[in-house]
Image (tube, rainbow, N blue to C red):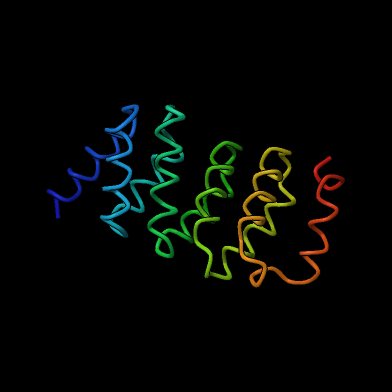
Amino acid sequence: MLDDDRRIEALIRDLTNRGEAGLRASTTLAEIGPPAVEPLVRALQVLEDEYARKLAALSLGRIGKPAVQPLIDSLRVADPQTRMLALQALSAVRDDMRVQHALLQARNDPNVMVRQAAWQALERLPPRHISPYDRATRRRRSELLQ
């Protein structure tokens, strides 16, 4: 277990490498799955390197359902960039009603960029996951973003 934790932490550090090395670390973390969720969420919330944070979000989205609740919890942090990245990761998990609910709630975020990210994430969901009311609301998107 300790070796796994060390490996995950080393891979988290590798996310800051541009190009192939960072992408390889992101892919490996996604393949590790649930044991990597907590360190990836922590990286998403605290790393200063924007590229590494985006790769952490990408990994969490690829992990899927085990990452959903920690990502939803990340929507409550103060940093709008973290909330936007969490929304992007959540949009990769399509068959979970918690995701739809979180994306719908994020449309009311106080930050306009986060609201925009919520709309973009909703648009990536298949139509069967969105209620008729919310499909109609999509048409009013531009006025709701102001």
- On screen, residue 8 above or below 63: above
The residue depicted at 30 percent of the width and 58 percent of the height is 33
Side of 75 where 5 appears, left or right: left
Farthest-out residue, left: 3
The residue depicted at 70 percent of the width and 43 percent of the height is 116
Residue 15 is situated, as x and y percent measured from the top left of the image, at: 33, 34
Q: How many marks?
A: 0
Q: The C terminus appears in which quarter of the rendering?
A: top right
The residue depicted at 35 percent of the width and 53 percent of the height is 37
Side of 65 where 118 appears, left or right: right
Residue 112 is situated, as x and y percent measured from the top left of the image, at: 73, 39
Q: The N terminus appears in which quarter of the rendering?
A: bottom left
- On screen, residue 119 above or below 13: below
**Which image quarter: residue 115?**
top right
Residue 4 is situated, as x and y percent measured from the top left of the image, at: 17, 51
Residue 77 is situated, as x and y percent measured from the top left of the image, at: 56, 44
**Which image quarter: residue 138?**
bottom right
- On screen, residue 114 above or below 65: above
Q: Closer to the camera, 142 or 78?
A: 142
